[in-house]
Amino acid sequence: MQISTLRVSYLPPRAARWRNSITLSDSLAGAVTSRLALQPDNSASLAALCGPVDQHLREIGGHLGVEIRNRGNLFTLKGSEGAVGQAKRLLERLYAELRGNGGALDSQALHLFLQEHQAVSDVEEALESQEISIQTKKKLIRARGPNQRAYLSAIAEEHICFGIGPAGTGKTYLAVAAAVESLESGRVDRLILVRPAVEAGEKLGFLPGDLTQKIDPYLRPLHDALCDMMGASTVQKCMERNLIEVAPLAYMRGRTLNNAFIILDEAQNTTRASLRRTLSATGLLRAS
């Protein structure tokens, strides 16, 4: 919930209220109409978004093939379903950036923004057109939604990938699935699953047992994901042969990890020094 002590409504002059229409054609066959309310209502950001005499809206509408009408922060978009969806995302993103930096928007900056948005849209369409899945010996894991597809694609293509998102979105599970597939296909020699031994907001108190039993509750989510994809007996055999290592972050000091798939779970609970040591162990970051 956002609380504002001052609310300014952007209302065009009376003579121009219903002239804020960018019409591409008199009739759009099969067009859909959608409405968008940009919040919070900010007159300066709206003025920068629309441009002088709605020049920016004309450029956006012409670029995407969408008819745009606005009255204050309320926008009506008419066009094909895909084009309207792109226009809504573009307006929301551009409005958020204008509110964030508080700067003006000129035609050159808008042109660059439209090019960037088109490149992002092309990548999203390419990801949506292909199904990205991971096949392990025990089960098939499919990416659900564009974010998970982009996440798996980044893991496959990049040396280092950061997954950021709320709990329950599949960050750890998909990363473990990609690691298991890499191990089973022979692309890596071993898996290193690391997690800081930090309590999740609750004190566990004194934990009985030896060191392994004490840290096991912190590493249980990684164990569960491995067993779900490989089976408990296979995981146990791989851990006995040191093909899979599940360890707290504190054990990574001084390690050299070659040809390994490393997952650092709950990395937001690490310190900068610990994160740097882990990256240095991979050989991708030179320690200084």
Image (cartoon, rainbow, N blue to C red):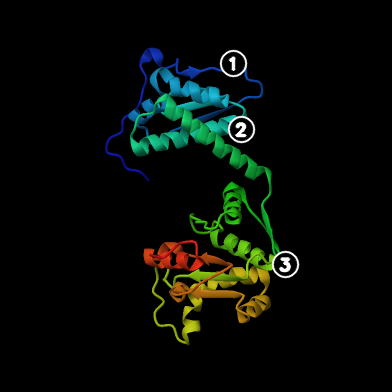
Please tell me in which quadrant of the rendered image residue 286 appears. Answer: bottom left
Q: Residues within 10 Å of mark 1 (few under 14, many from 20)?
A: few
Give the residue type that dot 2 points to: Gly
The residue that appears at 50% across and 34% down in the rendered structure is 90
Q: Considering only vertical position in the picture, is 90 above or below 136?
A: above
Question: Residue 133, image x and y in percent?
Answer: 68, 55
Q: Which mark is residue 82?
A: 2
Q: Secondary structure at mark 3?
A: loop
Residues under labels 2 and 3: Cα distance?
38 Å
Q: Secondary structure at mark 1?
A: loop
Left or right: 226, with 217 as reference point: right
Question: Residue 69, image x and y in percent?
Answer: 48, 22
Q: How many callouts does the rendering have?
A: 3
Question: Of marks 2 and 3, which one's residue comes earlier in the chain?
Answer: 2
Please tell me in which quadrant of the rendered image residue 19 appears. Answer: top left
The residue that appears at 59% across and 16% down in the rendered structure is 25
Residue for badge 3: 137
The residue that appears at 68% across and 67% down in the rendered structure is 186
Q: In the picture, which quadrant includes the C terminus?
A: bottom left
Question: Of marks 1 and 3, which one's residue comes earlier in the chain?
Answer: 1
Q: Residues within 10 Å of mark 3 (few under 14, many from 20)?
A: few
Residues under labels 2 and 1: Cα distance?
17 Å
Residues under labels 1 and 3: Cα distance?
55 Å
Question: Residue 210, image x and y in percent?
Answer: 47, 87
Question: Residue 78, image x and y in percent?
Answer: 56, 24
Q: Nearer the viewer, residue 169 or 58?
A: 58
Give the residue type that dot 1 points to: Ser
**Front tag of 1 and 3:** 3
Give the residue type that dot 3 points to: Lys
Q: Which mark is residue 25?
A: 1
